[in-house]
Image (cartoon, rainbow, N blue to C red):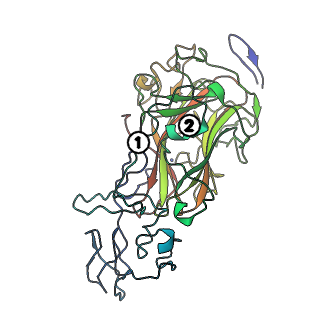
Amino acid sequence: MSRIIHRNVVLIAGVVALGAACSAGGNNLFTGSSGGGSQGGSGHGGGGTGAGTATGTGGDGITITPGTGGSTGNVCNHPPDQDGDGDGFTGNDGDCNDCDPNVNPGAIEVVDADPTATPADEDCDGQVDNVAPTCDDAIALTDGDPKNGARAVDLCKFTVQNPGNKNQKTWGVFDSQWVRADGAAYAAGEQVGIQDGWGPNVHPQGGKKLLALSSGHGRLPGQPGACNDNSCYNEGTGTAPTGFPQGVVGCDGGTAINDDVALQVKIRTPTNATGYSFDFKFYSFEYPEWVCTEFNDQFIALVSPPPTGSVNGNISFDTQHNPVSVNVAFFDVCTGCPLGTGELAGTGFDGSWGDDAGATSWLKSQAPVKGGDEITIRWAIWDTGDQAWDSTALVDNFQWIANGGTVTVGTDPIGQPK
């Protein structure tokens, strides 16, 4: 099957709760976390004093209710070379509270939702509730540094994979690259853009910038390198990750991908994190003409090791496990769609580049992690079946979830844009 454009013939997830409410600034600020109480209770700042079913008070003033078993509470008198709380750090390694596994140099600062709670120093850096500022304010549209791509999605903290000292084994990004969908190194060029918005009605969800990844050009009309058409051509044939392009029930999708591009980050997770989330938004010229055809472009968030509940490692899909494309249930920004066309204005997807188009609303994906592990996240987009009728994904607002709750893989709308 071929598609003729005016210049060329081209052949070729229900709501998932986040637990206690949390918010982030510079991806370091979180609420709703407290020490566990089943061992007598240990708050952010010290051991609890409760026993049995009595209520104890943690060192930061948070009231903690222990489990029903007997408990005498914790006393932090472990030898400095002993890991008393099993968090991988001893006092000699910089653990400033060896009775609380959520406190060590590898943890993330947590701001408690209770305004009366005494702030604490979870990361043992000698400062209490120190929250990093945003890190993407001054990044230029055409900046090609993949570290700044990570900063654009609000991954602000960088670290080294194998530090010389244990107390330097902190959480953060230790590698960031532009790659193709299969992870091969790539000079992304105009396919990526560090944007301060996407038209007049779509704004960053965190920080001052957002990342645009495109199978065409990650540009708006009037910007240097703008496509000025519904189809721009880049590197051509690519190699899809195993299991992709993912099929949709009832649609015979194509198997060849083209013009694929991705941001890949390798991260050590905070020792007190149980999950993470990020926001994204998908635009495509495939809508409405090419819905449920072999040409449905896709966006994925491929995670390794794959978390439980992912689809071939991908964590961004709807409740029917449909991948992000024009076939996803969340595709609701278009003529006649529930959210109308306001978020298409000024983007090139508003008809100004010669074709109707559509988009999803802002969506949030989340996944669980084990604290202190190393994970890889690859945000990738591609043309399916040919190089025409491009698609663009916006990625922003990466946050760690460190409220002690259980996190499951899922993707949900997050309401109206900021």
Residue at horizontal 70 percent and vertical 10 percent from the top: 7
Badge 2 crowding class, 10 Å Cα cut-off, few under 14, some 14 to 19, many 20 or more, is many
Outermost residue, left side: 116
What secondary structure is marked by label 2? helix
User: Between 312 and 161, which is closer to the camera in this rendering?
Assistant: 161
Badge 1 crowding class, 10 Å Cα cut-off, few under 14, some 14 to 19, many 20 or more, is some
Q: Which residue is mark 2?
A: 149
Which residue type carries mark 2? Gly
Marks 1/2 in contact by CB < 8 Å: the verdict is no
Q: Which residue is mark 1?
A: 414
Assign the N terminus to one quadrant of the image. Answer: top right
Rendered location of residue 79, percent (x, y):
47, 82
What secondary structure is marked by label 1? loop
User: Between 227 and 386, which is closer to the camera in this rendering?
Assistant: 227
- Classify 307 as above or below 250: below
Residue at horizontal 44 percent and vertical 25 percent from the top: 336
Rendered location of residue 280, percent (x, y):
50, 38
Number of numbered discs overlaid on the protein picture: 2
Rendered location of residue 326, percent (x, y):
57, 33
Which residue type carries mark 1? Ile
Residue at horizontal 41 percent and vertical 23 percent from the top: 342
For residue 306, which quarter of the picture?
bottom right
The reply to whether residue 415 is in sight is yes
User: Between 125 and 293, which is closer to the camera in this rendering?
Assistant: 125
Rendered location of residue 390, percent (x, y):
63, 25
Residue at horizontal 34 percent and vertical 77 percent from the top: 47
- Classify 145 as above or below 234: below
Assign the C terminus to one quadrant of the image. Answer: top left
Q: Looking at the image, is mark 1 or mark 2 nearer the viewer?
A: 2
Disc 1 and disc 2: Cα gap in Å?
23 Å
For residue 75, which quarter of the picture?
bottom left
